[in-house]
Image (cartoon, rainbow, N blue to C red):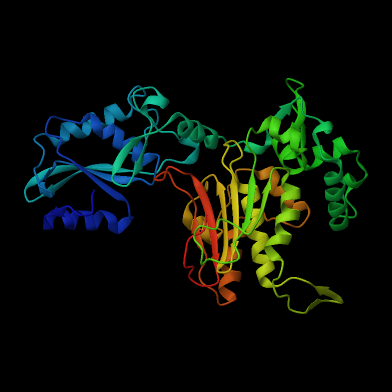
Amino acid sequence: MPMDIAVTDLIATLIERLQGSETLEVEVKLAQGGIPKSLWETVSAFANTNGGWILLGIKESNNMLEVEGLSNPSKMLDDFYNMLRNPQKINYPICNAQDARIESLDGKEILVIRVAEAPRQQRPVYINGNPYNGTYVRRHTGDHHCTKPEVDRMMREASDVGADSAILPGFNLDDIDQNALTRYRRLDQTLHPGEPRNTYDDVRFLSAIGGYGRERGTAKEGLTVAGLLLLGTDKGIREWRSRHLIDYRMVLTEDDPDKRWDDRVPWEGHLFGAFENIYLRLTTGLATAFQLQGATRIEESPVHIVLREALINLLVHADYAVPEASLIVRTPSGFLFRNPGSSRISEFDLLHGDRSDPRNPELVRMFRLIGLAEEAGTGIPKIIRAWRELGLEMPKIDAGTEDTNLHYSFVRLTYFLPRIVVG
């Protein structure tokens, strides 16, 4: 419902009561001729976004909302549930038996429908039997028809199989950067000296860490997406992903808004190399306090740890099925990490670490094996906690939502309020 529309006290009281249980968007429709066709577009849009309330029997006129009421709300309620169970009308019955009810306002009856946010595994919620013609999302106060790439992305995200575990037939050890694999194995062996995989040949080692796979039923085998992304050659990665770019930029001054960067690394190679190269540039010049862990000197400050977490978070959670680039920007005022792909869990869970649903679980595990990633959903809370303990500004986190057209996630770490927004 547009925020600038005036409402009667009765409607305002109802909306306040509805949003007292959960803060969701509200849409009103007059619905004097029965269930309106546009209702189902709104149901789809709410289900594919953040949920919402629909009020039938409310009149909008001259930027005002008035209670008009319904002549036969009981029949409309039956009609709604009958259509909700018709797969030719809507593919997933998003509302349960308690989600629609009749309310009385000033002696007039209206229909109130709560539409929940659909689980990732059930998206897209679409109408009229065709996902490409019948999928909607909510943007600002309107229902917007999804493009084919948006629908395809929802379908990819619905799978419980990790996006990075897919086998790439025809990709084999020849597509692996052998020097990078040697460095990776050395780190793994240092952290896990007693692991049997230390004695494996390269193909068996890659299989053990999720970088090489074989399907029993079809005998199809090859590198996995995770294996290629983590350690693949530039040529191999380009053959699989038409545009692969992890873009690091350093801006030395924010006084000139026309200057895009003073130093740039447009990295087009494997993720292990991306971490090795970009982490050094992110941390060059940062003060390092003298610390001891036992008899070993630790050459990292809390800022180093935060930046490492943020960079790994970007690398392992990006949506590599789309051609958009990941972006890292270092400025005098702070750091920006932006990757394609919205979070697959709620913002609350993301910020509190209550659960984890990684898009690329094999990549998470591969970085964890060399001490650079967690699997328990603690990355973002760890970043926030450490940054705040330093007495710095609260990190800005955007999980990416269906109410934007970009589907990016970003983490912005700021020393102080920046004068301009970079990126």
Q: Position of residue 411 (x, y in %)?
A: 54, 58
Q: Position of residue 7 (x, y in %)?
A: 14, 54
Residue 190's image quarter?
bottom right
Q: Nearer the viewer, residue 19 or 326?
A: 326
Residue 305's image quarter?
bottom right
Left/right placement of residue 139 relative to residue 360 reads left
Q: Nearer the viewer, residue 79 or 158?
A: 158
Q: Position of residue 215 (x, y in %)?
A: 74, 26
Q: Nearer the viewer, residue 52 or 149?
A: 149
Asked if 408 appears above or below 292 in the picture, the reply is: above
- Image label count: 0
Asked if 215 appears above or below 399 in the picture, the reply is: above
User: Which residue sits furthest bottom?
Assistant: 290
* Residue at 78% over, 54% down: 370
Q: Position of residue 28 (x, y in %)?
A: 20, 43
* Residue at 56% over, 53% down: 355
Left/right placement of residue 38 relative to residue 281 reads left
User: Which residue sits furthest left?
Assistant: 107
Asked if 367 appears above or below 156 in the picture, the reply is: below
User: Which residue sits furthest top?
Assistant: 218
* Residue at 35% over, 45% down: 51
Q: Nearer the viewer, residue 370 or 174?
A: 174
Residue 128's image quarter?
top left
Judge whether residue 97 can be spotted in this image.
Answer: no
Judge whether residue 252 can be spotted in this image.
Answer: yes
